[in-house]
Image (spheres, grey):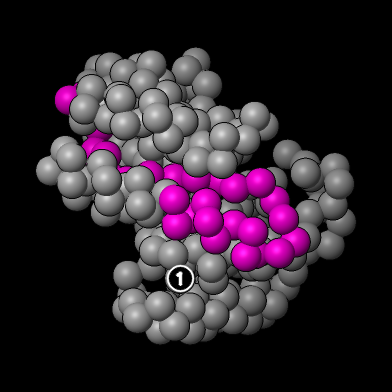
Amino acid sequence: MDQIEEQASEHEIHENRAEVLASMAAASRRAGRRPEDTHLLVVSKTWPVEMVRRAATSGQIHFGESRAQEVLEKVPALPETLHWHFIGHLQKNKIRKIIHLCETLHSVDSLPLAQQISRIAGEEGVTPGIFLQVNVAADSAKFGFSAASIVEEIDEVLTLPHLSIEGLMTIPAFSPDPEDSRPHFARLRELRDTLSTRTGKPLPGLSMGMSGDYAVAIEEGATIVRVGTAIFGKRNKQAQ
């Protein structure tokens, strides 16, 4: 696993988490939403087990990983009370390795991947929660359904028997100005509403927003924000 040059202390992590939760609550109130309707997913990718343990002592139980190898290393080493989410690009040959360890998959980016997950989940006797990743910005550097393809394929996804479809997820291109992400978050919410109306399925979840723009995401309807840097600090270049 990558090494980190400086590691935040347990006290610093607790303070950072409290600040993020306060900021999340303020964003919810600005949008006329209930703070409890948006949840914090702490992104622990590249950080060692001890750092996750420090965050867990603050009461954090939901953590996000993006590499199968890190999932395999960390989950057995940490308390069983933690809940793990897979947030990175998921290769088909890694599904069976992580499906018992990560209860929610945030990056299901195509119909064939969803079909493969459903098949393996049936064989393994599990029903993972999944978010369908949508490339609402049509960014060539990002994975995901296009806005058009999710409309065309959602009915087939919803027929897959061993999946619990939680909602939609997106990752806008990085920008130092969080307002640049707002139209993409709004677009994902509008797309979710369109799909819910057309299919009759609620699709309640919107997984969107990271350390730099989670407040804007909440204002636009996020139900889960994926925050790492604002909790643990910046990674060094090797850890990126």
Which is more toward the observer, 83 or 201? 201
Q: Which residue is mark 1?
A: 219
Secondary structure state at the residue bearing disc 1: helix
Residue numbers of the magenta segment: 159-187
Where on the picture, by quarter, is residue 72?
A: top right
Q: Residue at x 87, y 56 (%)?
A: 5
Is 153 in front, or is 207? 153
Residue 163, horizontal then vertical, whole percent: 25, 32
108 left or right of 161? right
Q: How many marks?
A: 1
Residue 119 image-quadrant placement: top left
Q: Is residue 28 visible?
A: yes
Is residue 107 visible to us here?
no
Residue type highlighted by circle 1 = Glu
Provide residue 137's location: percent of width, then percent of height. 56, 41
**Is residue 164 one of those drawn in magenta?**
yes
* Image x and y of residue 228, in percent: 63, 59
Q: Is residue 227 above or below residue 152?
A: below
The relative height of residue 11 versus residue 178 in the rendered view (above or below) is: below
Q: Is residue 144 left or right of residue 6?
A: left
